[in-house]
Image: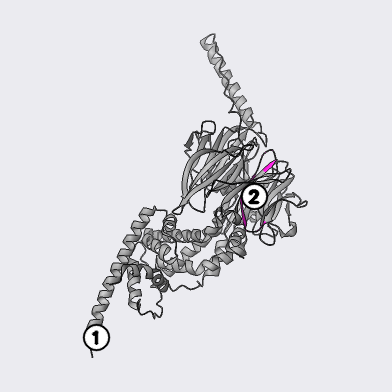
Amino acid sequence: MDQRTLVEQARGGDREAFAVLARAAATRLDAAARLILRDREQARDAVQEALIRAWRDLPGLRDPDRFDAWLYRLLSNAAIDEARRRRRRIIEVDITTTAMAVYDDPVVTFADRDALDRALAELAPEHRALVVLHYYLGLPLPEAAAAMGISLGAAKSRLHRSISALRRSFEVGADERSATATAGGGQP
Amino acid sequence: MIHDERFDRDLGGMLADLAEPRFPDYFNEALQRAMAHRQRPAWTFPERWFPMGVLARRLPLVPALPARMVGILMMLMLLLVATVVIGVGALLLQQRPAPQFGLAANGDFAYTQDGDIYAAMHDGSQARLVIGGPTLDVAPSYSRDGQSLYFIRVVSESPDVVEVMVANADGSGVRALTEPEETSGIHWWTISPRGDVMAMVNDSVSPRFSIISLDDGTRTALDLPNAIQVDQHEWLPSGEEIVLVGRNAAGWAGIFAVATDGTGLRTIVEPQARTYVLSFSISDDGRHLAYGAFHDDSGRLGVWHLVDLATGLDTVQLAPAGQHQLGPVFSSDSSHVAFVRYSDERDGRIDAQVFVAPIDDLAAPVAVGPRQRIPSGTGGLYPQFSPDAAGMVITSDDGHAWLADLPTGEYDELPFGNETGVSWQRRAP
């Protein structure tokens, strides 16, 4: 059954159809939420909230072919809300670093991942959300801007600053790794 | 140094590696929690289930006071008498029920604010609390005769449990029409034109579609033939049949009518594959039905259809190239239809504009109210004709409401929001 039919059925209250749609998106929703929030429990809460909003508001989805983009919008909004709640409560949370995978790409190294992780951590949640919507979830920038409720110009500016910051962190990390490798290379 | 282009190109993959995408172990629990909530229910689409009408007269003017006075005392006495007469007259006028269908005079607006229900004059002035207190009350909707005010009382938000309530139009005499357990999982509900029966689609019970007597609470489940699953529904003016959007076993959506005892199912619009039926509306004279739909064979453009209920003739109303037009609603005299045209889709946003056209000349609709730029794919504008046909209230998903004067095309934003829809009271002409 195609996604459009599933969306129509879910919109009419069909729980099984909604479960199929949600299951298909769950992995990306969870990963995106963890990237934005950098906290497993908060990511879980954000995905939970996004699923609630999706089920509750599905009858308001005018164009069924935009289900994925709409769902990603709900997730980014839920994640940003979650991040703001955290800021309001002024709770020091234990940032659980995402589990490291065995990384066998010779170009993008384990250290690069660590650098990316740290660089992402320095971005504001709203900036991380835009990066994740565009680069990870693949939303075109105009749609990512609409999802964030900001103008395309603001999105371009925000994304440019975010990517520049990430790139700088990478370069610093690369320099440090290079220096470490050089020093280490002199040891017996 | 990492090259800029390569960094941009690799970033998506690096993010994926960083996140380690995997199926979340909490998914089933999260899904169950999500679906314990009620789906966005009828009251967020008030125009669908409480269509109001167009055309006609303004509210009667207050009679002028006597012009001649004999003396100060006589003048005061006459003023006193006149005041009493006018007051009683106005009260009697208000107490006369409006006709259930067709033209009526404009009454108050009812709307929700912070969990309470307010009413205001039809120009937006003189707002006053109608249903207050600690309870969470939303989605006000006047009965067709303008005498009663239906609303939803939220008993619990997690899981969603509500009661359907009714009060006199002035807010007195509040009482529950349903038990909370009846409406856990409520998806769509409508009250019959005579106000004696409620039709309800409830996801928590099987069959989902039932009729509830408002006199004694008797529930009659309607298990429709051919495994038709009911979505939204509305009553025909006769009150003898309910029109519904239903999906057959293949998941194809069509529009049907069924008697209130569940018999006599007949097809109005044949179920079609790859068609996504949105809202529908029935004219007050019972002659026409209009519905909005997406069809894959129309290039994914939203269109609305006008159906002659006597002949079954279904006429598609196409928008100009590249535009959608959806959400048709009829005027109370059944002479006009309003719909929303969506155009200029780019950068994830789209323009929404309400148009009005006579039923017998749909080719040249006239724009009414504000043009709003909204996110693509969701939400929109919702027009609702005034009972007297001279005006229109337009609400938006982001909580705004505008009042438009149809003869002049002028409009103003109303001083109250649109949290859960705005209902326009019908009054006796």
Residue farthest to the front, as pictured: B321
Residue B154 in picture, x, y percent from top left: 57, 51
Residue A42 in picture, x, y percent from top left: 43, 66
Q: Quadrant of residue A144?
A: bottom left
**Horizontal side of residue B288 vs B27, given as left or right:** right
Q: Secondary structure at mark 1?
A: helix
Marks 1 and 2: same chain?
A: no
Q: Is residue B349 above or below residue A127?
A: above
Residue B62 part of the magenta segment: no
Chain of the residue displaying label 1: A
Question: Quadrant location of the N terminus of chain B?
Answer: bottom left
Chain of the residue displaying label 2: B
Q: CA distance from mark 1 to mark 2?
A: 75 Å
What amino acid type should be assigned to the residue bearing mark 2?
A: Trp
What amino acid type should be assigned to the residue bearing mark 1?
A: Gly
Which residue is labeled 2 in the image?
A: B189
Foreground tag (1 vs 2): 1
Residue B238 in picture, x, y percent from top left: 73, 41
Q: Residue at x 30, y 65 (%)?
A: A165
Q: Which residues are magenta?
A: B272-288
Residue A103 in picture, x, y percent from top left: 39, 79
Please name the colour scheme applied to the rendered image. one colour
Observer-nearest of B244 and B274: B274
Which residue is labeled 1 in the image?
A: A185
**Horizontal side of residue B367 vs B258, given as left or right:** left
